[in-house]
Amino acid sequence: MKHYEIATYGTLAAFAKVLKEKDCLKHLISTLDEEKNCDNLLTRIADTNLNSKAINS
């Protein structure tokens, strides 16, 4: 789900850039960065074999 959100915010940021909507672009890039950070955190959690541990519990 996070990848869809990242793709959406990235596309919207590209549109805002083309349309010279600087304020919108600033907010979209900020949100995009937040989504990327969340994705990185979720990836690190998944890499700890958390899903495997949950299945075996």
Image (cartoon, grey):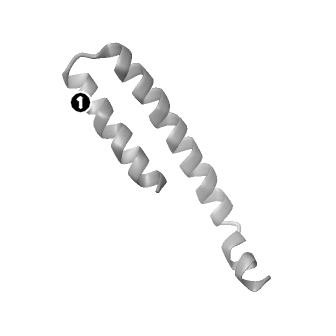
Q: Position of residue 25 (x, y in %)?
A: 35, 22
Q: Position of residue 29 (x, y in %)?
A: 42, 28
Q: Is residue 36 shown left or right of residue 52?
A: left
From what the image shows, is residue 46 above or below residue 32? below
Q: Is residue 18 shown left or right of residue 9?
A: left
Q: Amino acid at mark 1?
A: Phe
Secondary structure beneath dot 1 equals helix
From what the image shows, is residue 41 above or below residue 9? below
From what the image shows, is residue 35 above or below residue 51? above
Identity of the residue furthest to the bottom in this view:
56
Q: Position of residue 47 (x, y in %)?
A: 64, 66
Identity of the residue furthest to the right in this view:
57
From what the image shows, is residue 30 above or below residue 4? above
Identity of the residue furthest to the left in this view:
18
Which residue lies at the image location 54% right of the left edge and 50% below the top edge?
Answer: 39
Which residue lies at the image location 67% right of the left edge and 73% below the top edge?
Answer: 51
Which residue lies at the image location 69% right of the left edge and 79% below the top edge?
Answer: 52
In this rendering, the count of numbered labels is: 1
Name the residue tied to disc 1. Answer: 15
Which residue lies at the image location 51% right of the left edge and 42% below the top edge?
Answer: 35
Residue 27: image quadrant is top left
Viewer-proximal residue among 44 and 1: 1
Residue 11: image quadrant is top left
Q: Position of residue 5 (x, y in %)?
A: 42, 47
Give the quadrant of the C terminus: bottom right
Label 1 CA crowd tier, 10 Å (few <14, some 14–19, many 20+): some
Viewer-proximal residue among 8 and 45: 8
